[in-house]
Amino acid sequence: SDGTHNCSQNCTNTNGSFYCGCNSSYWLDFDGVTCNVISEVQRQNSLNVTLSNLTTSTFKERQDNFTMATAVAINCRETPEKCVTINNDSSSLRKRNNQQNLLKRQDTFVSANGIIITNKEDTTDGLQVTFFVIGMNGEVINAQAVVEAIQNIVGFTVTNIMLAFPTPQDEDDQMLSIAQIAAIVIGVSVGTLLLVIISVLVGYCLWMHHKSGRFSFKNGAQKHSDSNVENVYQLEHSLQGSVHSTKPKFTDVDSKKEENYEEGDKGKKSLDKSEEAHF
């Protein structure tokens, strides 16, 4: 052996054994030595799963358990009736044996080898494992189905699940959701502002109407008062005019009487003179 043990890319020797690995954008085939390029379909259905209380070093001992538990969860999603015994068994050993037996069935949907891990990375929230799933028929399992299944994985605590390689369409959908939320917030804000403006306008109109009513009442009262004053003035003026006009009338009568008396006296005197002359 040349020390690579026929690994097509990376080989890691262990105590008495070895295992092969692949570079980024490749995945290890079922033969355990061949590295294949990750296809577009495989990328679109790859997931990043965060497992709490695990690191890359501690995961090495549990990777086989993870692939088997993930495969069982997917099979249980497809045929729930097959998993009643597995999920209800209190013994970890019997549960593991039941899982292995389930994956050996002829009608198994996914085997443990179909869980293709392409990357492992330590994060502050735990170990992030990137993988996709290939079914027994050789087709890639839809990521949404894997997400629904892995939420019920046994033996591991999953804190986060997301697409490993979001497509532009996924990003557009996320932006659309953000835009919709922003539109709702703006709409509510504008609606609230319009409601406040309308309330202020209505209050102002009511105040002006009330003020106008009071002003009209005051004007009416003032006009009524002015009219009374004017009528009183006219009455007083009329009465005064009557008095003034009456007084001159009495004066004129007296003057005419005096003139008549004077004319009478003059006539009488003339008559007396004419009689004296006659005699």
Image (spheres, grey):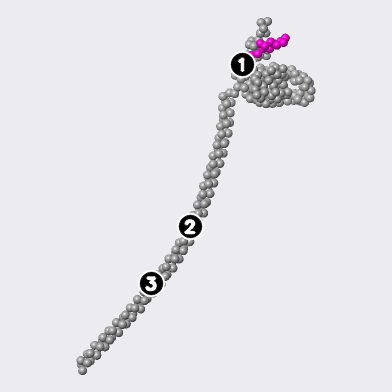
Q: Is residue 222 left or right of residue 255?
A: right
Instruction: Tell me the distance, in whole angstroms, between the alpha carbons under discs 3 and 2.
Output: 36 Å
Quarter of the figure with residue 170: top right
Around disc 3, counting alpha carbons within 10 Å, would you say few (fewer than 14), some (14 to 19), or many (20 or more)? few
Tell me if label 2 and label 1 are in contact, CB under 8 Å: no
Residue at 38% across / 72% down in the picture? 241
Residue 123 placed where, x, y %?
65, 22
Q: What amino acid does circle 1 point to?
A: Ser
Q: Looking at numbered disc 3 in the image, what kind of residue is underneath it?
A: Gly
Q: Is residue 196 left or right of residue 82?
A: left
Name the disc covering residue 216, or none: 2
Spot occupied by residue 26 in the image (x, y as percentages of width and height): 62, 15
Q: Earlier in the sequence, mark 2 or mark 1?
A: 1
Residue 18 at what x, y percent from top left?
69, 11
Q: Amino acid at mark 2?
A: Ser
Tell me which numbered mark, 3 or 2, is placed earlier along the sequence.
2
- Whether residue 16 appears in magenta in the rendering, the answer is yes
CA distance separating discs 2 and 1: 88 Å
User: Taken as a whole, is the magenta stretch helix, strand or loop?
Assistant: strand
> What residue is rendered at 41% in x and 72% in y?
239
- Occupied quadrant, residue 80: top right
The span picked out in magenta is 11-25
Residue behind mark 3: 241
Q: Which residue is mark 1?
A: 24
Element marked by disc 1: loop
Dot 2 surroundings within 10 Å: few (below 14), some, or many (20 or more)?
Answer: few
Using the image, determine if residue 218 lies above or below residue 139: below
Which residue is at 44% across, 68% downward?
232
Of tags 3 and 2, which is closer to the observer?
3
Q: Closer to the N terminus: mark 1 or mark 3? A: 1
Can residue 165 be found in the magenta stretch?
A: no
